[in-house]
Image (tube, grey):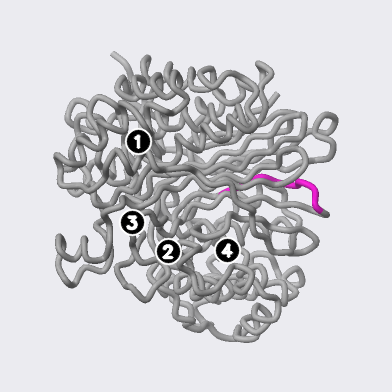
């Protein structure tokens, strides 16, 4: 008889950086190995990223899936490129559509079900990346994911925890197709139990064989549209067929001799840029790294950033302010003057959402570096799974507002406000680090905290990743287990409402970092992977 281990028992430990000329870092070890295998076969960082992303839809379905959205920033060897593979609203959506169905008092589209689903963009993003940069055959990149789906893979500790939490939510488990796909034996899998996802293997094979055509203009799109019609949704095959990902120019902000780059709106990456632009007016390095003064300034800068972002950011064509206006140096300097070092203030930000996301980074010895993020949002997203195809759909439509005065008001063909944000750091116009931290509204906050630790306090990548974090949420500062008690008390004395919150998986973010050490073919990279997830950084 096998031993039934207690998988939740452990002791404090620390991870160390991984050094190699070719690196992949993500939150599931098998997916990281899938990407590394592509590098070992002569593929580049884009090949590795696509293979890893595809594998993650099977290995970590509680955070992403074949119905996800995605964003990417990559250094192609000469310049930074951005890819927005977030989906658009069905053509039939409008504020009136939702108020007719959900009442005149409805403020947003629903959290779950087909009326929360926008056209999934991740698969189109994989195809677009491969078409422009891939070296290996596209079908080869999806082969590891297909193998994991058909043979099954054991469920790791953190993934199982998130999965089991979702299985306790009736609003998810009651959605069409969810239980058949994700509750084998009528429950969430146990730690170490094998999960087989044959329907997803079928879809992955179709995507591999048709380079995504079956997904957007063929069998898969038709199946998704039929499922939507059967369950009261407005999504059509024409909505799928009309979708195209968009290559974009990343936006940036200078900080301590480096430049942080983010994807421009409809995402929230600009929040990290605003906060850093405010924080550069303070001598952070002169303050103790984990002390009250440093943490207070970072929290206040982040609050100011959110106040602007949640008021003005949405689909770019609907915004009344441009990103350049929001990052104008004189404006950021004026915002910095609003911070009182001696007390916390309410700067009036909007309500912040939560998230369910995976992040990966890959870099190769020729110098290509990829920062890629993929998400279903709110864990399993909409909860809807198209039967026979394993198509687990995001709920990004819930990110819209029905308020016609806001840039983020819902409309057919529009992209909603997005929380997922890959990041990239350069120095003197050259690549320095590809990185990202998943976790809903925590993402720009963690970008800020980890970069301050690295650039102001010279902490190495893994230490900056491991350090306890704070999270500002709706007027409350949550602090992670291990956060300095005296600092927490000092923040309370300044007027912050400080409360502990122990669910680090969901609420304090989880990141992956790849730092270029010099010539990648000679010096290689240093990589870090967040201990808040099951994953790892791997290299050769």
Please state which of residues 173 and 193 is positioned toward the viewer in this rendering.
Answer: 173
> Which image quarter: residue 458?
bottom right
- Mark toward the start of the polypeptide (3 vs 4): 4
Q: Which residue is identified by label 3?
A: 412
How many residues crowd mark 3 within 10 Å: few (<14), some (14–19), many (20+)? some
Distance Cα–Cα, label 1 vs label 4: 33 Å
* Residue identified by numbered label 4: 270
Q: Which is closer to the viewer, label 2 or label 3?
A: 3
The residue indicated by pointer 1 is 160
Image position of 219 (left or right of 310): left
Mark 3 → mark 4, Cα distance in angstroms: 24 Å
N-term-proximal mark, 2 vs 4: 4
Q: Secondary structure at mark 3?
A: loop
**Is 271 left, or right, of 81 in this rendering?**
left
Task: Label 4, secondary structure: give it.
Answer: helix
Q: Quadrant of the N terminus?
A: top left
Magenta range: 429-436
Q: Is residue 487 visible?
A: yes
Q: Which residue corresponds to mark 2?
A: 500
Quadrant where the C terminus sits is top right
Residue 326 image offset from top left, x and y in percent:
60, 73
Residue 357 lies in the magenta-colored region? no
- Nearer mark to the viewer, of 2 and 1: 1
Mark 2 crowdedness (10 Å alpha carbons): few <14, some 14-19, many ≥20: some
């Amino acid at each position: 008889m096998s031993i039934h281990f207690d998988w939740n028992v452990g002791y404090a430990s620390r991870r160390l950086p991984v050094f190699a000329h070719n690196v992949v870092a993500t939150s599931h070890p098998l997916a990281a190995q899938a990407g590394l295998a592509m590098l070992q076969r002569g593929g580049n960082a884009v090949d590795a990223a696509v293979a890893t992303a595809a594998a993650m839809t099977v290995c970590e379905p509680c955070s992403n899936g074949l119905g996800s959205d995605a964003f990417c920033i990559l250094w192609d060897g000469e310049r930074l490129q951005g890819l927005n593979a977030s989906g658009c609203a069905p053509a039939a959506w409008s504020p009136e559509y939702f108020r007719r169905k959900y009442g005149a008092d409805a403020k947003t589209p629903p959290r779950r079900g087909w009326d929360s689903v926008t056209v999934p963009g991740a698969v189109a993003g994989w195809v677009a990346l491969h078409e422009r940069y891939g070296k290996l055959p596209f079908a080869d990149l999806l082969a590891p994911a297909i193998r994991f789906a058909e043979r099954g893979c054991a469920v790791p500790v953190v993934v199982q925890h998130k999965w089991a939490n979702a299985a306790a939510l009736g609003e998810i488990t009651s959605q069409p197709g969810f239980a058949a796909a994700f509750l084998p034996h009528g429950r969430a899998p146990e730690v170490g139990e094998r999960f087989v996802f044959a329907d997803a293997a079928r879809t992955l094979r179709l995507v591999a064989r048709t380079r995504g055509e079956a997904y957007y203009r063929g069998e898969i799109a038709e199946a998704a549209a039929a499922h939507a019609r059967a369950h009261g949704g407005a999504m059509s095959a024409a909505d799928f067929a009309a979708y195209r990902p968009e290559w974009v120019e990343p936006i940036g902000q200078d900080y301590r001799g480096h430049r942080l780059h983010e994807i421009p709106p409809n995402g929230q990456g600009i929040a990290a840029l605003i906060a850093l632009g405010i924080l550069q007016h303070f001598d952070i390095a002169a303050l103790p790294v984990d002390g009250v003064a440093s943490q207070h300034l970072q929290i206040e800068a982040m609050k100011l950033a959110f106040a602007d972002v949640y008021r003005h950011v949405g689909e770019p064509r609907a915004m009344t302010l441009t990103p350049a206006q929001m990052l104008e140096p004189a404006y950021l300097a004026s915002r910095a003057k609003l911070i009182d070092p001696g007390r916390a203030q309410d700067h009036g930000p909007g309500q912040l959402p939560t998230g369910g996301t995976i992040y990966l980074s890959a870099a190769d010895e020729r110098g290509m570096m990829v920062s890629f993020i993929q998400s279903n949002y709110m864990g399993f997203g909409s909860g809807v799974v198209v039967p026979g195809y394993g198509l687990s759909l995001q709920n990004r439509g819930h990110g819209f507002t029905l308020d016609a005065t806001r840039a983020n008001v819902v409309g057919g063909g529009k992209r909603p406000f997005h929380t997922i944000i890959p990041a990239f750091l350069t120095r003197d116009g050259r690549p320095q680090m590809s990185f990202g931290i998943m976790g809903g509204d925590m993402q720009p906050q963690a970008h800020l905290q980890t970069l301050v630790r690295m650039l102001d306090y010279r902490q190495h990548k893994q230490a900056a990743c491991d350090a306890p974090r704070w999270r500002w949420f709706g007027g409350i500062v949550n602090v992670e287990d291990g956060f300095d008690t005296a600092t927490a008390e000092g923040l309370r004395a300044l007027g912050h409402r400080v409360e502990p919150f122990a669910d680090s998986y969901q609420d304090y973010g989880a990141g992956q970092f790849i730092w270029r050490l010099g010539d990648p073919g000679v010096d290689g990279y240093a990589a870090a992977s967040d201990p808040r997830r099951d994953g790892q950084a791997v290299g050769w």
